[in-house]
Amino acid sequence: MIKSDYPGSARQLAINLIAVCFSLASTFVAQTMLLISVPVSAFELGASPFLIGLILSVPYLLPLVMAIPFSGIITRAGGKIVIITGGFGMVLGPAAILMFPGFSGLILVQVIVSIAHMAMILAGQSIVSSLGKGKKLEKYFGWYTTCLSAGQLVGPVLAGWLIDTSGMTLSVLVIMAVSFFAMLSGFFLTGSAAIGCRVKRPLFEFQAQTDLLKENVGVKVSIALTVAVVFALSAYGTFLPIYLKSLEVSATMIGTLVSLRALFSMLVRPFMPLVIRWVGGRSIAIIWSPVLVAFGFMLTGMTDNFLFLSLLAALIGLGSGVSQPLSMVVLAESVSEDQRSGALAVRLMANRGVQFLAPLSLGALAEVMPFSLAFLFGGAFIFIFIGLITYMMRFFKDE
């Protein structure tokens, strides 16, 4: 695991936090620009909702099985080289759209970017989780995820505006340019973020992570929470553009709604410790934050009113803004330092599994029923996990 000792150097800690936040924020600008560009391109090529869901789901299969091996690479090589290499992949991936027009290019860009994105997320989370504990860690993850939300805020509306005003080609070139800055910021990482450490190989084997998941209630709570929320965010990001495009809403307006969700996530995250204290503690925040996401998601397919859709986007943003960093904090504090990269990899595997299933399942539902019912069934799935979280919290409190 990346070492957590910063010997008297607050400056070094600040440099690493700023560098990783800027890198991942830029990465999320590029990735969320693709979330608008890819489904809009597929829609314009005549793809059905199910085919679009398939295109957006397939790339998550490789990260699903590669997350745990990558966690070992990050620990041994250090976060710096992984951030730089992943940034290069983020630059290379979008070029596939220009080189291979049609569905093949859309699938190829998704595959390359999803692997690069996975590597950078794991490296970023490992670096941040090594910077402190307790309320300090809540604060650091709050700022880290605030920067990610800033990227998610800028990306969709920028992509929508570029597509409407200048076309898809310029949008892709901008994605590549933003990804270059994500790679460049990795060179500023220093100290323990730039070096790896030797740990026992079994810590990064699948069996070790399976045992950890069986035995550690904190890991279970963290993963159930992230599954519930990521399902909603993935399905929302995928099918809101398709739903609104079918209503002949412009790409700019679609991007604005997706960015609005990210805006409210970003606004709440710097105040995460205060919000947690205000609602009555972590346990209550862990339960109620996904409830807000579920209600916002369920009602999205029932209206075409832009104002109401904006309010629902804000609701989803507030809920996910609290739940996602809280999930990482709970996980980081529930395992030992040597186990942390592997545990974060398990969490990311759960994310990628849900990101594979969400577009595929919602796409299949949208083929046979109205969008309103598809969103409703998706919300019901989220509430199943909220029930599991509520049950597990009884045991988590005793730890």
Image (tube, rainbow, N blue to C red):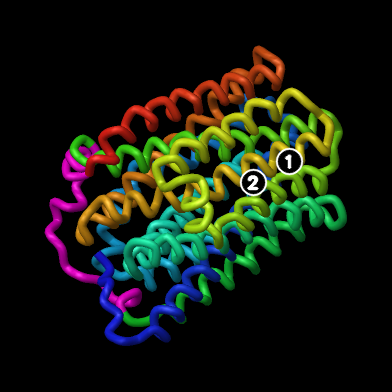
Q: Nearer the viewer, mark 1 or mark 2?
A: 2
Rendering quarter of residue 70? bottom left
Q: Amino acid at mark 2?
A: Leu
Q: Position of residue 326 (x, y in %)?
A: 43, 50
**As drawn, is 282 to the left or to the right of 39?**
left
Q: Residue at x 62, y 45 (%)?
A: 317
Report if residue 45 lies within the magenta region.
Answer: no
Assign the N terminus to one quadrant of the image: bottom left
Toward the viewer: 262 or 362?
262
Q: Main secondary structure of the magenta part?
A: helix
Q: Which mark is residue 35?
A: 2
**What residue is shown with label 1?**
40
Q: Is residue 92 visible?
A: no
Q: Amino acid at mark 1?
A: Val
The answer to whether 186 is drawn above or below residue 391 in the figure is: below
The answer to whether 328 is drawn above or below residue 130 in the figure is: above
Q: CB of mark 1 within 8 Å of CB of mark 2?
A: no
Q: Is residue 122 visible?
A: yes
Q: Position of residue 225 (x, y in %)?
A: 42, 38
Give neighbour class at mark 2: few <14, some 14-19, many 20+ (Cα, 10 Å). many
Report if residue 199 lies within the magenta region.
Answer: yes
**As drawn, is 2 to the left or to the right of 285?**
left
**As drawn, is 168 to the left or to the right of 15?**
right
Toward the viewer: 379 or 197?
379
Q: Residue at x 70, y 64 (%)?
A: 174
Give neighbour class at mark 1: few <14, some 14-19, many 20+ (Cα, 10 Å). many
Assign the C terminus to one quadrant of the image: top left
Could you say whether the residue bearing mark 1 is in a helix, strand or loop?
A: helix
- CA gap, disc 1 and disc 2: 9 Å
Toward the viewer: 153 or 389?
389
Q: What stretch of residues is rendered in magenta?
A: 192-213
**As drawn, is 361 to the left or to the right of 249?**
left
